[in-house]
Amino acid sequence: MMEPVGAPATAPAAPQNPLLEYLGIRLVSWEVGLATFTLAVEPRHLNLQRRLQGGVIATLLDVACGYAGLRVEPGKPPVSGLTLMLNTAFSAGVSTGTVTAMGRVIGGGRSIYFATGEVLAEDGSLIASAQGAFRRASSHG
């Protein structure tokens, strides 16, 4: 499992994403090849079984893996990206607390990259994991 990354004094700047804002997903750490997000689980995030909805978990994994490949070195133009494929495995449920999603780039090239991610409960137990393929694009196109 990936080790949680401690929160910096101030959260890094990330591109505006209305869906993440709506869901309450917060960027905690973002560096080249790594991204960490958190979500405080609320009743609105739960399914009929009163567990964190699988779609919310998949969104956390998609965002963590995707953003991990979009951070660029200072002075380089920003990039955007899209998900080509995301395989997700659910391991456990959670109903309360804050979950952490971590993504890490594990390979690829200039435009296509591969990433893996995990969503962990507050106690460090694995909720879900994912592997995906993503494509970078310039922020202008």
Image: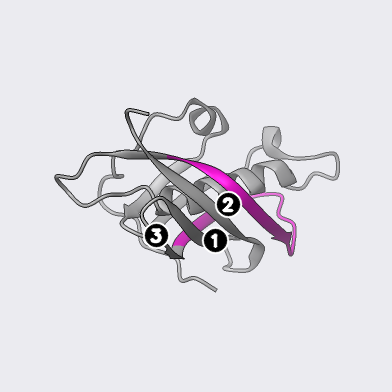
Q: Calculate the distance from the C-alpha at mark 1 to the C-alpha at mark 2.
A: 6 Å
Q: Which residues are magenta?
A: 81-104
Q: Earlier in the sequence, mark 2 or mark 3?
A: 2
Say which of marks 2 and 3 sits in front: 3
Residue sitting at 58 percent across and 46 percent down? 84
Q: Position of residue 126 (x, y in %)?
A: 64, 67
Q: In the picture shown, does residue 20 fall above or below 127?
A: above
Query: Where is residue 8, by image quadrant?
Result: bottom left
Q: Nearer the viewer, residue 5 or 98?
A: 5
Q: Nearer the viewer, residue 15 or 57?
A: 15
Q: Nearer the viewer, residue 109 or 44?
A: 109
19 part of magenta stretch? no
Q: In the picture shown, does residue 94 fall above or below 21?
A: below
Numbered circle sitting on residue 61: 2
Residue wearing tag 3: 109
**Local crowd at mark 3 within 10 Å, few (<14), some, or many (≥20)?**
few
**Quadrant (top left, top right, bottom left, bottom right) of the C terminus:** top left
Q: Helix or strand or loop: what does disc 1 sit on?
A: strand
Q: Helix or strand or loop: what does disc 2 sit on?
A: helix
Q: Earlier in the sequence, mark 3 or mark 1?
A: 3
**Local crowd at mark 1 within 10 Å, few (<14), some, or many (≥20)?**
many
The answer to whether marks 1 and 2 mark residues whose Cβ atoms lie closer than 8 Å is: yes
Q: Calculate the distance from the C-alpha at mark 2 to the C-alpha at mark 3.
A: 21 Å
Residue type indicated by callout 3: Gly
Numbered circle sitting on residue 127: none
Q: Helix or strand or loop: what does disc 3 sit on?
A: loop
Using residue 1 as the reference point, say whether residue 35 is left or right of it: left
Residue wearing tag 1: 117
Q: Earlier in the sequence, mark 1 or mark 2?
A: 2
Q: Calculate the distance from the C-alpha at mark 3 to the C-alpha at mark 1.
A: 19 Å
Residue type indicated by callout 2: Leu
